[in-house]
Image (spheres, helix red, strand yellow):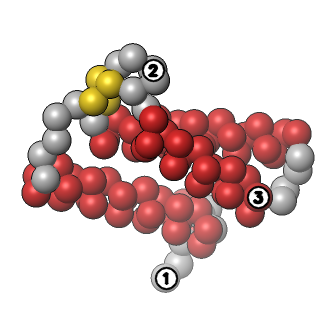
Amino acid sequence: MDLSWMAWTWPTAIFFMIIASLLVVFTILAIKFPETPRTGILRIETTRGDRLFITLLGSAFINIAWLGLVGENQPWAMAVCALYAAAVFRWV
């Protein structure tokens, strides 16, 4: 598959495929297992989709900060993002 039409690399394409897959999975979960919003440490009502959005946004900032402060050793930034995601889904 040629990705040159948008100057994408395979890691970029995989990233967006994972985001699209997450959206599909969370949509199926919302339909199959409806939930009531819950209030966490932010004192706002959130659903799974809200927590996914907060996780994705925060992970973007973590990766940008990591690149600026540490450099290109991104696997460790991914580990920090995984911990952040676990914390968001548990406590937010």
User: Which numbered circle lies on residue 1?
Assistant: 1
Task: Tell me the element at label 1.
Answer: loop
Q: Are marks 3 and 1 in contact (CB under 8 Å)?
A: no
Disc 1: CA contacts within 10 A as few (<14), some (14-19) or many (>=20): few
Q: Amino acid at mark 2?
A: Leu
- Of the numbered discs 2 and 3, the one sitting upstream in the chain is 2
- Front disc: 2 or 3: 2
The answer to whether residue 53 of the structure is visible from this angle is no
- Residue in the picture at 61% in, 50% down: 83
- Of the numbered discs 3 and 1, the one sitting upstream in the chain is 1
Q: Quadrant of residue 44?
A: top left
Q: Position of residue 84 (x, y in %)?
A: 59, 44
Q: Position of residue 61 (x, y in %)?
A: 65, 36
Q: Are marks 1 and 2 in contact (CB under 8 Å)?
A: no
Extreme residue toward the right, this view: 70
Q: Quadrant of residue 21?
A: bottom left
- Front disc: 3 or 1: 3
Residue 53 in the figure: left or right of residue 70: left
Q: Amino acid at mark 3?
A: Trp
- Residue in the picture at 52% in, 47% down: 85
Task: Tell me the element at label 3.
Answer: helix
Q: Amino acid at mark 1?
A: Met
Residue 61 in the figure: left or right of residue 49: right
User: Which numbered circle lies on residue 83?
Assistant: none
User: Which numbered circle lies on residue 42?
Assistant: 2
Q: Position of residue 41 (x, y in %)?
A: 46, 23
Q: CA distance from mark 2 to mark 3?
A: 27 Å
Q: Is residue 32 above or below residue 5?
A: above
User: Which numbered circle lies on residue 76?
Assistant: 3
Q: Is residue 28 above or below residue 48?
A: below
Task: Tell me the element at label 2.
Answer: loop
Q: Is residue 46 above or below residue 70?
A: above
